[in-house]
Amino acid sequence: MDWRTGRLPLKGLLVVDWSVFWAGAYLGMMLHDLGAQVVKVESPYNWDPMRTILDVNPGARGAQQALPPEERCNLNQHFNEWNRGKLSLAVALEREEGRRVLLDLLARADIFIENHRPHVKEKLGIAYEDVRKVKPDIVYLSISGFGQDGPERDALALGSPVELASGLFSLNGYHGQATPAKTGFSYADPVSALVALGAILLALRQRRRTGKGRFIDIAMRDALSFGIGSAFVDWALNGRERPRLGNRHPSYAPQGVYRAYGADEWIAISVRNDQEWQALVRLMGNPDWATDPELATVEGRRRHHDLIDQHLERWTSQHCARALEAALQEAGVPAGAVLDYRQLRFDPQLNARGMTQEVQHPLFGTEVRTRSLWQRGPCSQPIERPAPCFGQHNRYVLREILGYSEQDIQRLEEQGIIASSIHPSPQHD
Amino acid sequence: MTSTSFKASLASGTHHSITCSTPTTRTPNSNVHQEQYLSLALSDVLVLELSRTWAAAFAGRLLADAGAAVLLVEPPDGHPLRHEGPFPQDRPHPEASAPHLFVNAGKRSLALELPAQAHRLLALLRQAHAFVTDVPAEELDSMGLSWQRLHQENPRLVMTRVTPFGDTGPYRRYQGTNLVCLALGGQMKITGDPGLPPLSNAGAQAEYQGGLAAFAGTVANLLLAEETGEGDYLDLSIQDVVANNLEGRSLTFNLGVMAQRSGLCPSAVYGVYPCADGWVFVNAVSPSLWERLKAAIGLPELEDPRFGSQASRLAHNDELQAIIASWTVSMSSDELRRLMRQGYPLTVAETVPSLLEGEQWRQRCYVHRVRHPAAGEVPVLGPLWEHPPGWSPAPAPLLGEANRELLGEPVQEG
């Protein structure tokens, strides 16, 4: 954005972020990265579940799992990744006085984001109709699995299950195999967060012109299906679902992921044209199999893709993935090592562009956090602050943003309307 | 809209009816005013798209879905996605490729021979509000279309360049494709079966993510430019976006926990199971979801103390998986979909045809039957936000269909 002056497009705007898990939290973080102040709202009875689950992978249970939820809720490395930079307000939304605190905050807010199932906001009396009474020009955005209406509105939705509902799952899979495949993480979440970000920015532009806010309904399923939009056209043109391509490309050949030297090491290679094929053949030392004139054209290479894959892998498996990547790129052939998360942390390109930064978390200590996507390169913005501990900014929000008196704040604390610790029930083990 | 008005709209900066059909009015008690539809939010914005792959093309499509007039600048033999199948009956036809019919819907087409006709492009960029491209910086420079030049000529213009690796860093001259970006962005290593190679998901997902970021970033830059009067340049790297969108990387960076490929069913309480005629996702990762799953399945075996706590369910993963699978294979997708709609933690796998025929999208008006002169009627998804009844994207443009209008007489210079 505006690197010269450091000016960001959402500077001066207040976002209330009532998000759970990933999509909504990531959206809130990106709004912060574009300059907004973001207050994450949670209840001591219904906090963002990301604070207390999935903090280690199944089968690799770490020490944190042994801590009581009240302690580990501030240490969770999923939560802390997607909520950095935000302020935390912990208020009992289920109680009328708590709801009134939230509405007071919303009366001063520009944007409200949430990603619960559609009926939850209605049950708590914080649906769009309730909120626009206190803030007529609010931009109110809901992300749900399937949308705010229709027969599927009440279906449960997390990112990975939604991938099945989107049609993407059905097209995924290894080349030529009958079994579909799912993306290895909750792919629908970041995709719908980016869609929601764009939609909020559009609504802000309209608000600037008309003075009016609006409700925005983003469905995670729709966002994923859009990414495979051409498959729906293909169905109409040919009456078929596209066969699974795996790592192959509809027109480039060869393209694939090939074993490299070492355990679970792989190189991705795409050959987009004859020139890149010739460069690859030269790099391999012009072996007989590759100089077959049949392979000089893309049609021929597509016909003999299986054979090329076998030969190519015999070559790649003798070399380190990173060495192959460098040599192939030097020769002008698109290629990249298949990086695992540890290699990603030390990737020279991501680091040169400033992906990560260390921040000090008051309880966890030094954390590696990811910087704003919008200002990579020489002007990457430093991260302001780590993710908030539960209720960490209650007093700041009530005093500085809402202008409550010390007596009011003390009363709310004594009555348990605002809290600085979660109240786990058996439901949250 | 007639050809004269398109040209007039370029000059006056009002393009609202170029890409959308005229909205019908809603009922008076509707809480959304007509001018509030997000599908009209950019109806006074002119975007030039000079793209070769998916990311910039997706960004252009999303901007068109927000009401912008998007002019796709193509080489005389057509945008590369016109030459990428699938085609009708698998016979290549540059007007009827599925990628083109989808991702270029709602755009206009101007065929230009570059670099020879770069001055034409520059003349249009002087009038535009946004420029979205994936063309290498050196090539833009050599055509006199560097950001510095464009900023000088049209200070309010915002520009987004979305490329595999961005403008800076050691890979800035690397060649990248969708597959290479998925590999170097970390999403591929964790996708697929543990015993098989890492797997790319279907379509051009790295480019889609880059396109979404380019779309949002372009609108953010427009907001800023309208406030300051001065446009800015956004350098987006698809590798950056892919790595940013990665779940769980923080566990590795901070706890040393590595994610692995885990196939279809990472655990009995969180994974994909076969059903009688398809697949279903079972998600019972929390105690309350487990209770609801048990209620949906109704098998007494699930009351066994071996499955009494989350830890115990993990410890008896394989036995539990077998019991759940014995139930799912006895159920049809329709039966499971009914349970899903009632809020049970089950998600049914849909296919392209089941989605096109499904009730949910019909009610959301998410599929538009668009008549295309060369391809006939095709289903085009979109927009991703609310739109007026009757709204439909214009069909993907015929190659160079705007040339006569825009170049038939000299384009207004300066």
Image: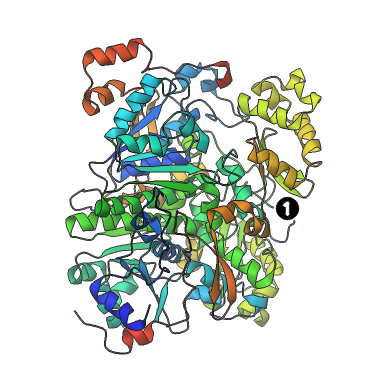
Is residue A196 placed above or below B305 in the rendered structure?
below
Q: Is residue A313 left or right of residue B229?
A: right
Of helix, strand and loop, which one carries label 1?
Answer: loop
The count of marks equals: 1
Q: Residue at x 70, y 25 (%)?
A: B313
| Location of residue A304 (image quadrant) | bottom right
Residue at the front extreme, as displayed: B28
Q: Mark 1 — on which chain does it sit?
A: A
Is residue B102 placed above or below B280 in the rendered structure?
below
Residue at the top extreme, as displayed: A414
Q: Quadrant of the C terminus of chain B?
A: bottom left
- Residue A375 appearing in the image: yes
| Location of residue A140 (image quadrant) | top left
**In-front residue for pair A324/A16:** A16
- Residue B168 appearing in the image: no
Q: Residue at x 54, y 17 (%)?
A: A66
Is residue B120 placed above or below B266 in the rendered structure?
below
Q: Quadrant of the N terminus of chain B?
A: bottom left
The residue tagged 1 is A179
Residue type highlighted by circle 1: Thr
Where residue A329 appears, as percent x and y from the top left, is 47, 64
Dot 1: few (<14), some (14–19), or many (≥20) neighbours within 10 Å? some
Where residue A364 appears, as percent x and y from the top left, is 40, 24
**In-front residue for pair A286/A130:** A130
Q: Residue at x 73, y 57 (%)?
A: A177
Q: Is residue B105 left or right of residue A136?
A: right
Where residue B34 appears, as percent x and y from the top left, is 37, 57
Q: Residue at x 42, y 71 (%)?
A: B107
